[in-house]
Image (cartoon, rainbow, N blue to C red):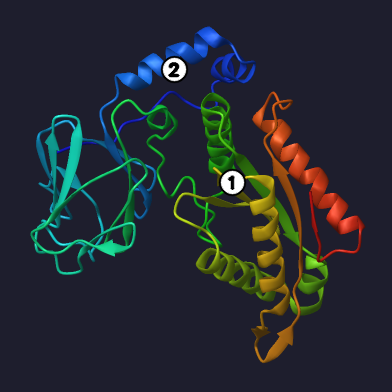
């Protein structure tokens, strides 16, 4: 049975310093290390979230059966749901007559038919989503044994600040190494203290959970990282996204929150959010610099009257 693996601790100070400062030798070592990695499937939605399953055998069964080569604890997945077959450097996925079907990028795979997986394909099995990365991809090093309980905010059930900072550092390194776009949204709820003081903390908790629900269901893609930063503050990491696309998304989120009917114990309330948007630039030499830029933009949005987007 394949077991998830853990990469180097992304919070290790020496790792941060060498890569963030652009040490070319360190980057080359990372690339060489990546080339040695097998193809893998990463659980990005489901349990155990963040785990990597390396495709080390020619044939591997995916299912909830404890004896499956890749065991995913999801009752909506069949005991023997689908099969992975390695053919030279290609990886093929076949549905094994599962009850709820096998989907690749939201397209259902006909029973008994196979498809070759490409980089970043999203494989949906039951309620779980796994991301495929081919052998040798640098990204493989940036995912590890991230248990969902330790990295989930208990109230909202999205990622917590600890996981966010790990993911931010990993995505920063990835974007720097591969020269890809990377943007983040930093937002909080306007006058949230007044809601708590007027209606009570249980109402405040309801508002937080409802805001997360509508944003997660409406705008967060499987590859995005949505986390509670603290209190009423949230962060959304958007890989392969430039500043213009990020601002468009921020405006949609702002409008959705402002127009959503928040009703608690028969009382309807208006909730708004201010959002700061920042994009990774060549001048930024740390992941901290990116989140600092988004935080600065957030304060600009709040100072200009709240219920605004600023970058």
Picture disc at residue 24: none
**Label total for image:** 2
Q: Is residue 177 left or right of residue 183?
A: left
Residue at the spot 69% in from the left edge and 46% down from the top edge: 243
User: In x, y percent, where is residue 193?
Assistant: 80, 66
Picture disc at residue 30: 2
Q: In the picture, which quadrant includes the N terminus?
A: top left
Residue at the spot 65% in from the left edge and 16% down from the top edge: 21
Q: Is residue 219 left or right of residue 264?
A: left
- Of all residues, the one furthest to the top in this rendering is 25
**Lower position in the chain sequence, tag 2 or tag 1:** 2
Q: Badges 2 and 1: C-beta atoms under 8 Å apart?
A: no
Vertical arrangement, residue 102 with respect to residue 168, above or below = below
Rounded to the nearest angstrom, the CA distance separating label 2 from label 1 is 24 Å
User: 133 or 52: which is nearer to us?
Assistant: 133
Residue at the spot 60% in from the left edge and 72% down from the top edge: 210
Q: Quadrant of residue 305?
A: bottom right
Residue at the disc numbered 1: 241
């Amino acid at each position: 049975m394949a077991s998830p693996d853990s990469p180097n601790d992304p919070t290790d100070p020496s790792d941060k310093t060498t890569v963030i400062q652009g040490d070319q030798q360190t980057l080359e070592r990372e690339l060489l290390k990546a080339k040695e990695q097998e193809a893998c499937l990463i659980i990005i939605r489901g349990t155990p979230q963040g785990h990597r399953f390396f495709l080390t055998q020619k044939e591997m069964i995916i299912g909830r059966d404890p004896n499956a080569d890749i065991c995913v604890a999801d009752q909506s997945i069949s005991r023997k749901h689908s099969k992975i077959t390695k053919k030279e450097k290609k990886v093929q996925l076949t549905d094994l007559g599962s009850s709820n079907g096998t989907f690749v990028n939201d397209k259902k795979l006909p029973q008994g038919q196979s498809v070759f997986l490409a980089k970043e394909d999203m494989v949906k099995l039951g309620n779980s989503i796994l991301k495929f990365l081919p052998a040798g991809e640098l990204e493989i090093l940036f995912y590890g044994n991230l248990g969902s309980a330790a990295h989930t905010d208990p109230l909202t059930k999205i990622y917590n600040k600890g996981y966010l900072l790990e993911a931010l550092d990993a995505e920063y390194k990835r974007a720097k190494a591969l020269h890809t776009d990377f943007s983040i949204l930093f937002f909080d709820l306007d006058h949230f203290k007044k809601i708590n003081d007027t209606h009570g903390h249980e109402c405040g908790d309801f508002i937080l959970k409802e805001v997360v629900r509508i944003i997660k269901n409406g705008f967060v893609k499987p590859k995005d990282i949505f986390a509670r930063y603290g209190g009423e503050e949230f962060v959304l990491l958007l890989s392969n996204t430039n500043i213009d696309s990020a601002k468009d998304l921020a405006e949609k989120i702002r409008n959705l929150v402002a127009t959503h009917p928040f009703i608690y114990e028969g009382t309807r309330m208006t909730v708004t959010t201010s959002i700061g948007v920042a994009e990774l630039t060549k001048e930024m030499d740390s992941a901290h610099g990116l989140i600092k830029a988004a935080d600065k933009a957030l304060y600009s949005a709040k100072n200009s009257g709240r219920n605004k987007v600023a970058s």
